[in-house]
Amino acid sequence: MEAVGGAIFTVAAVQEFRQQVLPVCEQVDSSSMNWTQFDKILKTLWDKDTRMELVEDDVMFNGQVITDDLRAALEALEDGDYIDFGIKLGTTLDAATNGDQTLFLY
């Protein structure tokens, strides 16, 4: 359950960074950034039907099990590899947000 809270905290921290710190940085580097995917993850994360939650022993996000991927991200964090942690967490949330939940076999 702590992993769910930690993942939500991390996304909230990025959102806060975007609102508080990024405007100062943009005064130095005015190139635009594309936040479309982050906004989509954020919307999915806060939606009561798709939010991240613990179901039995699995962490679910947007109807998909992300337990193993989240565990790998947290292991990278525990090892002090913050870049790998960010990549793994972002990739996990991105895949769960964009993944097609319906598979039809004909």
Image (spheres, grey):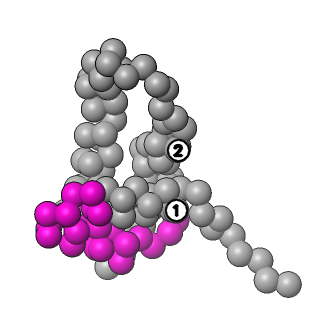
**Foreground of the two, 100 or 50:** 100
Decide if residue 1 is in sight here: no
How crowded pointer 1 is (Cα within 10 Å; few <14, some 14-19, many 20+) is rated as: some
Asked whether the viewer can see residue 51, the reply is: yes
Q: Position of residue 91 (x, y in %)?
A: 44, 61
The N terminus is located in which quarter?
A: bottom left
10 on left or right of 98? left
Relative to 62, residue 23 above or below: above
Location of mark 2 (residue) = 37
Residue lying farthest to the bottom in this orientation: 106
- Answer left or right for 63 relative to 105: left
In the rendered image, which quarter contains the C terminus? bottom right
- Give the residue displayed 32% in from the left and 46% down from the top: 11
Q: What kind of element bears circle 2? A: helix
The rendered magenta stretch, by its main secondary structure, is classed as helix
Query: On screen, 47 above or below 3?
Result: above
> Disc 1 residue type?
Ala
Q: Nearer the viewer, residue 59 or 19?
A: 19
Tell me which amino acid carries mark 2: Gln
Query: Does residue 72 sit above or below 5 in this rendering?
Result: below
Q: CA distance from mark 1 to mark 2?
A: 11 Å
- The span shown in magenta is 61-85
Q: Determine the residue positioned at 28% across, 32% down.
A: 17
Query: Is residue 79 a member of the stretch shown in magenta?
Result: yes
Could you tell me residue 15's position as x and y percent?
33, 35
The mark nearer the N terminus, 1 or 2, is 2
Name the element at disc 1: helix
Label 1: which residue? Answer: 95
Give the image location of residue 59, x and y in percent: 36, 69
* Magenta run includes residue 97: no
